[in-house]
Amino acid sequence: GAVVSQHPSRVICKSGTSVKIECRSLDFQATTMFWYRQFPKQSLMLMATSNEGSKATYEQGVEKDKFLINHASLTLSTLTVTSAHPEDSSFYICSASTGAQPQHFGDGTRLSIL
Amino acid sequence: GNSVTQMEGPVTLSEEAFLTINCTYTATGYPSLFWYVQYPGEGLQLLLKATKADDKGSNKGFEATYRKETTSFHLEKGSVQVSDSAVYFCALSSIGGSQGNLIFGKGTKLSVKP
């Protein structure tokens, strides 16, 4: 089946640094990729939707300058958390879709900001 | 707006017990409905789906029937196993199969004891 690889799976860094998370579709071309954030014991909250070659569409309340999304190719999207602070600590999950098939999710990235 | 409500957990069952996790939805038009499963420390996996009224989705012994009259999509399994322990999310998409925007319920944690 379709596979989405998300890297890194876990990252711990100091406050003020920027962290990049990669999301790759390994065996299909993803016209659309989604980025979610999941707080402990809560559901997934959609942060933004990105289409290859165009700017991401952010959900209300998500700071676009804080969470930079790049979808440069049909198989790669990146989320960069800029100047991360402890309140940015969370579980970030990406998903990818061809548009006609269900979203396929990555295994998530556990981000911990000290 | 569109929303998904699912029963709060945690749900604790003994092996071979019958499982029901309730899910109801509010949506305009004719949404597609999904159940996703999240194992500890991992991303989401699509468990089953239904795209129109009276459709039954099934996979790995799990079933759910799209009931438009009751706006429900309850998840059932006749005999659970310890390996079914996970968090289950009900979700809907109002953009047909493309899942342009998945709306998730809050998730229900299932623990199956041997």
Image (cartoon, coloured by chain):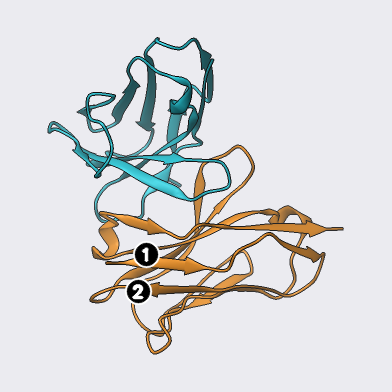
Chain colours: A cyan, B orange
In-front residue for pair B111/B50 = B111
x, y percent for residue A31: 22, 41
Q: Earlier in the sequence, mark 1 or mark 2?
A: 2
Secondary structure under badge 2? strand
Could you tell me how far apart the alpha carbons at marks 1 and 2 are, in whole angstroms? Answer: 9 Å
Residue under label 2:
B26
Which quadrant is the C terminus of chain A positioned in? top right
Which residue shows up at 48% across the image and 51% down it? A43
Residue under label 1:
B92
In-front residue for pair A59/A9 = A59
| Left or right: residue B9 compared with residue A2 | right
Q: Residues within 10 Å of mark 1 (few under 14, many from 20)?
A: many
Q: Residue furthest right?
A: B114
Q: In the rendered image of this protein, does residue A79 appear above or below residue A95?
A: above
Which residue shows up at 44% across the image and 29% down it? A6
Which residue shows up at 39% across the image and 23% down it? A21
The amino acid pointed to by label 1 is Leu
In-front residue for pair B42/B62 = B42
Q: Quadrant of residue B10?
A: bottom right
In-front residue for pair B80/A88 = A88
The amino acid pointed to by label 2 is Thr
Q: Quadrant of residue B41?
A: top right
Residue at mark 1: chain = B
Q: Residue furthest bottom?
A: B69
Which residue shows up at 56% across the image and 54% down it? B37
Q: Quadrant of residue A61?
A: top left
Residue at mark 2: chain = B
x, y percent for residue A39: 50, 40
Secondary structure under badge 1? strand
Q: In the rendered image of this protein, does residue B78 appear above or below residue B102?
A: below
x, y percent for residue A83: 35, 14
| Left or right: residue A74 compared with residue A80 | left
